[in-house]
Structure formats: C-alpha cells, structure tokens
C-alpha cells in the first residue's frame, strides 16, 4: 500500500509538471504569435512550422511520466492549485514572449532578416527555449541538484537536436526553412542563454 501511495503521489507530481509546462509554453507562444501577426507584414511562422514546433515539443515531453520527483513532492498529498497554475503561466508565459519580442527586434533591426530567415530563426529560438526550459521548471530547486530521469533527458535532447538540425537539411525546405547566417544564429543563442537564466530566477 505504501508503495502504491508513493507511486500515486509521484505520478500526480509529474502531471502537475506537464500541465505547468504546457500552460506557460502555450500561453507565451500564442501571445507572441498574436502580437507578431498584427505587427509584421508577413507570417512570423508558417503553419507547417507551427505544427512541427508543437509536434517536436510534445515529443520532448514524452519522458515526463518517468521523471524523478523530489522527496518534498511526495512527502504529503498535493492539491490541484488552479490559482497557482494560472499565476505560474501568467509569469512564465509573458517572460517567454518578452524574449520572443527581443528576437523579433534583433532579426528585423539588427540583422534585416528576410521573411524566410525570420521564420526559421524564430522557430529555432522557440524550440530551444521551450525544450531547454523543461530542465529548469521541472523542479522547484536548482536543476543541477535534481537530475532528470534519463528517459526525459533523451526525449528532450533528441527533439531539440531534430529541431536544430532540420532547417539545415534538404527536408527543411519542405517546411519553408531558410538557413540563417552564423551571426544571426549566435545572436539567437545568446538570447536563449539569457532567457534560461531569467527563467531560473523567476520560477
């Protein structure tokens, strides 16, 4: 019985992780997409790219049911806290959007990105921030003190690798990707790193 209770609490804790990640990610993406669609003279991301983004993000989270849970999360029953979920999404979602808008500004005003380059660069930034932040918000503590389960690590990093490499392959042209220049990629990488630091501080 004790083992069953422990397993039930672990499962519920992982469900809460998944809901928290999904709510904040979807809220941030839809906010960014809505504002960008109004402000830009072209689509910020093509429909096929959005579908690919969602598919890869879902694949990255396949390992969540296997993930490790801290002892504090199973020490006592957890409650479904809708107010806490909304508060978390209302903070982490707009944080993601802020960095999306910084990406838009850099692509337009610093790099003068053409529509294809813009869409590809935002796809790369979006995938990197969505997947890598999993390792940050999956735990209340510091991510290096609560190592994720190998299944979650593999599912997340494989999805990330596919997302990062696909635009530079012949298959990428099927989705309308245009390979950005190295300097643009370096700028995106810097924004991703700063975003992850901010996410760790705000979570």
Image: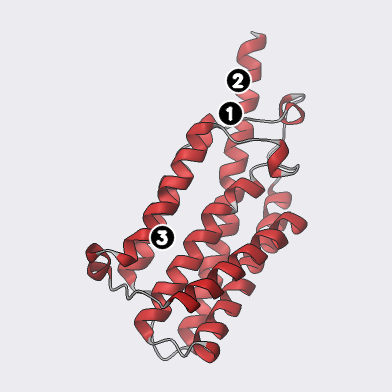
Whether the residues at callouts 1 and 2 have beta carbons within 8 Å, the answer is yes
At horizontal 57% and vertical 37% (from top left) the residue drawn is 15
Whether the residues at callouts 3 and 2 have beta carbons within 8 Å, the answer is no
At horizontal 48% and vertical 72% (from top left) the residue drawn is 185
Residue 168 percent across, percent down from the top left: 32, 66
Q: Nearer the viewer, residue 29 or 177?
A: 177
Residue 200 percent across, percent down from the top left: 72, 54
Crowdedness near tag 3: few (<14), some (14–19) or many (≥20) residues, C-alpha within 10 Å: some
Q: CA distance from mark 3 to mark 1?
A: 31 Å
Looking at the rendered structure, the secondary structure element under dot 2 is helix
Q: Tell me if 56 is positioned left or right of 36 in this view.
A: left
Q: How is the image coloured?
A: secondary structure
Task: Looking at the image, tell me whether mark 3 or mark 2 is earlier in sequence order.
Answer: 2
Q: Quarter holding the N terminus?
A: top right
Q: Tell me if 86 is positioned left or right of 51 in this view.
A: right
Q: Quarter holding the C terminus?
A: bottom right
Which residue corresponds to mark 3?
Answer: 164
Which residue corresponds to mark 1?
Answer: 11
Q: CA distance from mark 1 to mark 2?
A: 6 Å
Task: Looking at the image, tell me whether mark 3 or mark 1 is earlier in sequence order.
Answer: 1
For residue 100, above or below residue 145: below
For residue 29, above or below residue 143: below
> Which of labels 3 and 2 is toward the front?
3
Looking at the rendered structure, the secondary structure element under dot 1 is helix
Which residue corresponds to mark 2?
Answer: 7
For residue 120, above or below residue 75: below
């Amino acid at each position: 019985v004790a083992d069953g209770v422990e397993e039930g609490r672990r499962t519920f804790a992982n469900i809460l992780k998944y809901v928290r990640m999904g709510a904040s990610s979807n809220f941030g993406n839809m906010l960014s997409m809505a504002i960008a669609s109004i402000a830009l003279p072209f689509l910020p991301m093509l429909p096929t790219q959005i579908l690919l983004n969602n598919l890869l993000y879902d694949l990255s989270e396949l390992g969540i049911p296997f993930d490790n849970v801290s002892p504090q999360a199973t020490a006592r029953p957890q409650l479904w806290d809708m107010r806490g979920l909304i508060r978390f999404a209302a903070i982490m979602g707009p944080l993601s959007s802020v960095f999306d808008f910084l990406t838009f500004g850099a692509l337009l005003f610093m790099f003068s990105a053409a529509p294809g380059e813009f869409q590809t660069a935002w796809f790369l930034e979006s995938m990197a921030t969505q997947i890598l932040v999993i390792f940050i918000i999956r735990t209340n503590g510091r991510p290096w003190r609560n190592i994720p389960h190998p299944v979650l690590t593999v599912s997340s990093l494989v999805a990330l690798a596919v997302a990062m490499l696909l635009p530079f392959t012949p298959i990428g042209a099927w989705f309308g990707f245009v390979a950005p220049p190295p300097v643009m990629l370096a700028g995106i990488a810097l924004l991703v790193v700063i975003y992850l630091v901010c996410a760790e501080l705000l979570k």
